[in-house]
Amino acid sequence: MSMRSRERRTLLLEALSVGEIDVDEIAERLKVSASTVRRDLQHLSATRAVRRTYGGAILASHPPETTLTERLAVNGAEKRAIARAALDLVEDGDTLILDAGSTVAAFGQLLARRRLRIITNNLALLPFLAEAADLELVVLGGALRATSMSTIGPLAVEGLRLMTADRAIMSADGVVAGRGLCEVSLDQVILKSLMMRQSREVIVLADTSKLGRAEQSAWAPLPRNWTLVTDSPEPKEQLRRLSEAGADIRIADGREA
């Protein structure tokens, strides 16, 4: 039986992690045709995970990370629409884990009048939530990550191990079917992975520019079943793959409130 495409692409990424690969050489190693390898590389190139070269491919270089302020300015209307749609998935009395990130920050700002317990490493939310009468706010300590105005590291991880939640509200640099949430650093994905494990339900907030995006090298796998709130029914192919990977997809109404 031939190797499945997902397995081949995983092996291709692993081979690329140690340097440039040659199509004919990797085809012989995987016992498939060179045309099959080229199709797989074309797929990975479309998700920006690799860059094609003459006769082969290399891993795409990782782009410089933007700050939270810069990310808030990109696709702002879409992020606000996603945040409003996600409110319908939260019930009064819930315990929520709020991840760092600009779309989760937009969502968190809408919670000040809700009756909730919030656990977060998202320091940008503190001015909006600190004085909310019906919120119990738990802030995870740790090392400051200034680009995202969040905490990470062993102190944040150990604190979170003591708590569980109804729902984890997650963000990411990219969301890829079969791989999960991608970020710049292992510290980020270690904490994100724990956030998801400590929660009964996982909700990912991501505009469509994040879908299929694999520009960073660290990955937090998603659970078997999860919810994606995004801003458009396009791209259909990416949404189909994510649905097959366990996502319950919710499309936000893009109209401003």
Image (spheres, helix red, strand yellow):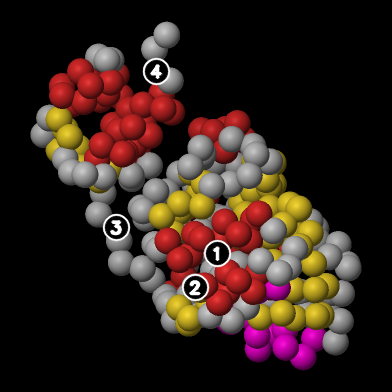
- Image quarter hosting the C terminus: bottom right
Q: From the image, tell me which residue sits under label 2.
A: 153
Residue that label 1 marks: 191
At numbered mark 1, what does the secondary structure look like: helix, strand or loop?
helix
The answer to whether mark 2 and mark 4 are in CB contact below 8 A is no
Magenta residues span: 119-132
In reply to whether residue 226 is colored magenta, the answer given is no
Label 2 and label 3: CA atoms lie apart by 22 Å
Does the residue at mark 1 contact the one at mark 2 (Cβ under 8 Å)?
yes
Observer-nearest of 20 and 35:
20
Task: Tell which circle, 1 or 3, labels the residue nearer the N-terminal end.
Answer: 3
Q: Amino acid at mark 1?
A: Leu
Dot 2 alpha-carbon crowd within 10 angstroms: few under 14, some 14 to 19, many 20 or more: some
Quarter of the rendering containing residue 52: top left
Q: Position of residue 33 (x, y in %)?
A: 25, 14
Please name which of the two marks, 2 or 4, marks the residue nearer to the observer.
2
Q: Which mark is residue 62?
A: 3
Q: Quadrant of residue 81?
A: bottom right
Q: Position of residue 15 (x, y in %)?
A: 26, 37
Among the two numbered marks 4 and 1 on one chain, the one whose residue lies closer to the N terminus: 4
Q: Is residue 34 above or below residue 11?
A: above
Above or below residue 119? Residue 21 is: above
Q: Residue at (42%, 48%) from the top-left corner?
A: 213
Q: Which mark is residue 3?
A: 4
2 or 3: mark nearer the eye: 2
Element type where label 4 sits in the image = loop
Give the amino acid type for the residue marked by disc 2 in the picture: Gly
Q: What type is the residue that disc 3 sits on?
A: His
Q: Secondary structure at mark 3?
A: loop
